[in-house]
Amino acid sequence: SSSSSHAPLPTSRESVMGVLGGATHLSILLSLLASCSCEDCASDVTSHVQVEQGRKDVRRMAQSSKRSKRMTRTVVQPNKLYWQGYGNPMWSYFLGLIGRDRVNFGGVVGNANVGLNMMGNAPMGNTFDSVTSDSGILGLLPGCFSDSCNGPEDYDDLLTTLAREGKMKRAFTMCFNNGPDGGGNLYLGKPEVPKDATIISMAPMNGQQNFYCPMSSFDSQENVEFLFGDVKVGSQNAGEWNEMMMNHQSFSDTGTPGLMLPVEIYSNLAAALQKTLQDGLANDRECAILWESMSMQDIVYGALVNEAAVNCAKPLLHDLQVKLGPGVSLTVSKESLFYETAPCSKQYGISWTTTNDRTTIFGSALNFGQTLLYDTSDLANPKMVVLGPAAGCTQDYSAAPNAKPIPMSGLPGQVLGGAGTITANLHLGSPGQQITVQLDSGSQKLMGIHQTCRNLGNCFMVQPAGQTTVALVPGTDIDQPQCQQQKEDISAALQGKCQMGSRSVFCDCGSREDCFSMILEAASKSVVPNQVCAVTRKMCGDPVDFHPEASSTFEPANFPSFAFAKPPGKQQVTVQCDRTHLCD
């Protein structure tokens, strides 16, 4: 199995750091100020507190203070039991089962593999948090559910499956609105490309693992240049750039928040931002007063700035342009630089940060305010096409029979902040059950949540330790009383089957398949879970769970059950749903 990670960056002033994630300003007056509360979230029924339809466009406030390179690790076993992990060191995992069912995505219908999470430690929080492991994910990369993937003949991602069934060409277009309400549209199929569009070749996508990696067309002796307005803030040899893209060290990914630049280039950019601001403030006394106790360098190092200061500074700043070849550039709009860290807080951070090395990751800031076509109809020669500005996402680029524009949801702060999340709805099963998924161009799997899924909190982490070995290692909350009880219960259930260490448990079962099954069964029978999976979203009426028994087309018909025998303990859970903030 290959390995991948959400590796956190250093947060010292010596290494230029990212800033707190969040959601952005609501542009309309909101008349509701409310919260949903669940005192006993012991079952799926009691955790579904329905709210009126007008509040179902859930907006999530990111709470992460860490920026990370987007990579994941997956292990799929022959009995369709899978393990998914995020992070290096790992911060999140879940165990689930793979089925197959009818998927309706924007009017294009096919049969595809879907993973259903049964158990994990996905961080809880309010409904503005990332939905990567809470609500579901739709990976837009070509690839396999399993890391054991030999090439295109094995690809089983949704879009490849639909293309293989003749429903569409394997291409899609994403239009990210840059207005205060964010969102946008996704369009399936390969549309006609305007003559004035910018066409950029990407690294071939017919290997075992793929990313959307824009290549330079410069000679290997020439340089890719980074320009902030007319100011050159750095360059990178085109040969080195292309090597990093071919090796997937650099890439483009809507699931990575903002923009991540090589450390030296980012340092130069920070200086250029500061000088540009200072020069502009010299001619704007009113704006200068707002910035007199704050500098752009402070913001780069994690300080926040108020809304008035952001609004007066924006006209003074410039877009960032990355020149990839003669007449070929990628532009990151200055509108993506600032984002509000919490709804109506009027406190802003910046989404442009550094990888702390020489790599470049075009995260959600690249898409913000633009319409990009990802053309993978020829996997050996894929293209990224800049079709133009978002312009309200009014033009329909759908190019598949029966396809309709697929609305995307996500406030600018959710898209650009720590969550790096934009979502859409699809329908799974017969009759179709609507679920909300994160649209992620940095992964290839379609995953949802089984209705019996339970969150165990950060008590222990399940992770592979070898070809036949799986370990249970301490989580961040292991010393809490509830976690100590979980450890005692799971250890008792695995006594005689696994080796007990002072803080960790090691199971050697002959195969990881047997270990995963044994751990999932032991946990479901003996452990008191922390919460129902995605309970906060369910409380706000978000479509989350999938019920395979309610679908006449779901396979296999004898889908295993790992329902937990013990309910979560009685607790108070409070969540702020969409449009519950009163913005003046």
Image (cartoon, rainbow, N blue to C red):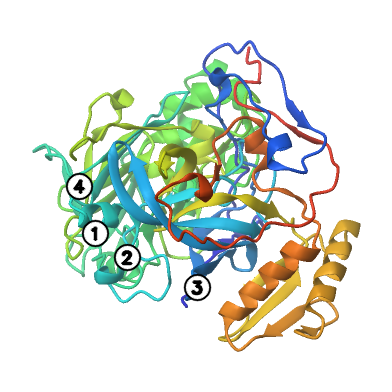
Task: Tell me whether the residue at label 3 lies in contact with that at label 1, contact meaning CB atoms closer than 8 angstroms.
Answer: no
Name the residue type under label 3.
Asn
Q: CA distance from mark 1 to mark 2?
A: 8 Å
Q: What is the spatial separation of the Cα atoms under label 3 and label 1, in whole angstroms? A: 35 Å
What numbered label is drawn on residue 202? Answer: 1
Residue type at mark 4 is: Met
Q: Which residue is mark 2?
A: 245
Residue 525's spot in the image, x, y percent? 76, 64
Kindly report which numbered mark, 3 or 1, lies closer to the viewer in this rendering.
3
Residue 545 locus on image (x, y percent): 56, 44
Q: Position of residue 490 (x, y in %)?
A: 80, 70
Q: Amino acid at mark 2?
A: Met
Q: Would you name the residue on which mark 4 appears?
A: 168
Of labels 1 and 2, earlier in sequence is 1
Whole-angstrom CA distance, mark 4 to mark 1, is 21 Å
Tell whether label 2 touches label 3 (CB within 8 Å): no
